[in-house]
Image (tube, rainbow, N blue to C red):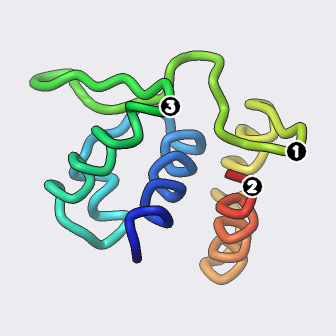
Amino acid sequence: MNAERRGKAILLFLAVNGRSTMSEIAAELCCSRRTIESDVLTLAREYPIETKKGNGGGVWLMEGYTPLRRGYDTNDIENLKEILKIVNEELGKTIHKVLSDLV
């Protein structure tokens, strides 16, 4: 996965999951924590991403911000999160593909 696709995937992951750690994102995207740290630093120059190191730290999108286009909002994200909980793995992959196209 190249840096541009990883950046979109990170934004999507944060939009869907909320506050997370660099390690959790790295595990989800199958890359190193250092790669994610570098990508988040780059993304933070253009997007409202917050980070905090240490205990209770993590990475998240500023409240109220959604990276989704085409009129989708945070309620849509919440609905998709609920759908992801109940669908099988293959349908989940399809939903993630659709969401990544919207970021």
Q: Which mark is residue 37?
A: none
Q: Nearer the viewer, residue 16 or 47?
A: 47
Tell me the residue at 27%/41% (across/down).
Answer: 21
> What SS does tag 3 mark?
loop
Amino acid at the residue labelled 3: Tyr
Looking at the image, tell me whether mark 1 or mark 2 is earlier in sequence order: 1
Q: Which residue is label 1 attached to? A: 70
Amino acid at the residue labelled 1: Arg
Q: Which residue is label 3 attached to? A: 47
Residue 81 position in % (x across, y down): 67, 48
Q: Which residue is label 2 attached to? A: 102
Tell me the residue at 12%/23% (across/down).
Answer: 55
> What SS does tag 1 mark?
loop
Tell me the residue at 71%/48% (across/down).
Answer: 82
> What SS does tag 2 mark?
helix
Looking at the image, tell me whether mark 2 or mark 3 is earlier in sequence order: 3
Residue 94 position in % (x across, y down): 71, 75
Q: Quadrant of the N terminus?
A: bottom left
Looking at the image, tell me whether mark 3 or mark 1 is earlier in sequence order: 3
Residue 4 position in % (x across, y down): 47, 62
Residue 63 position in % (x across, y down): 56, 16
